[in-house]
Image (cartoon, rainbow, N blue to C red):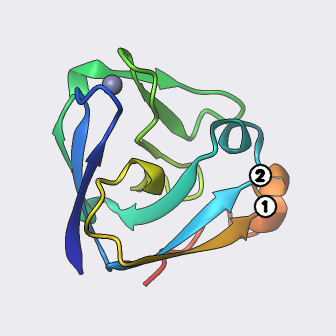
Amino acid sequence: MITHTGGCHCGRVRFEVLAPSRLEVSECNCSICSRGGYLHLIVPAARFKLVRGADALTTYQFNTHTAKHLFCSTCGVKSFYVPRSHPDGFSVNARCLDPGTVEHMSVTQTNGREWERQYPDGRGAYPP
Ligand SMILES: [Zn+2]
């Protein structure tokens, strides 16, 4: 595990996330992830630290209102959020990580469009 850093476009939101250098990320086909081109790096809450920008975040919710979609109110970038599949953790947008620490990224597909079928237990497991 190493510390990756990242944030939004304008720099108001900055975070650190503890994850392997070879990342397993997922691409989701749901209505919001597909529109944003979001790449999910899902981690337990203990491995994520918001360094700055709590005051810059705008929350958007829809459907079950479980997920908290967090956008920088200045630049509009969603660099991390609280996903419905892991409401006790975070999903970091792998596209918002700073260059230099990611050795490799493998992308799997998540069928968020059929959420109940993708997550029959009502939530997802954490990747290793
Ligand atoms: Zn910003």
The image quadrant in which ligand 1 is located: top left
Circle 1: residue type: Asn
In the displayed structure image, the side of residue 32 where residue 25 appears, left or right: left
Q: Tag 1's secondary structure? A: loop
Quadrant, the N terminus: bottom left
Q: Amino acid at mark 2?
A: Asn
**Residue at image x 59%, y 68%?**
124
Q: Position of residue 80 (x, y in %)?
A: 41, 44
Displayed quadrant of residue 35: top right
Q: Quadrant of residue 97?
A: bottom left
Label 2 SS: loop
Residue 120 position in % (x across, y down) = 76, 69
Q: Can residue 46 be seen here? A: no
| Pointer 1 residue | 111
Identify whether 76 is placed above or below 102: above
Taking the spot 66% from the left edge, 73% from the top edge, the residue there is 108
Residue 37, how many percent across, how many down? Answer: 64, 45
Q: Quadrant of the C terminus?
A: bottom left
Q: Which residue is mark 2?
A: 29
Does 49 sit above or below residue 104? Answer: above
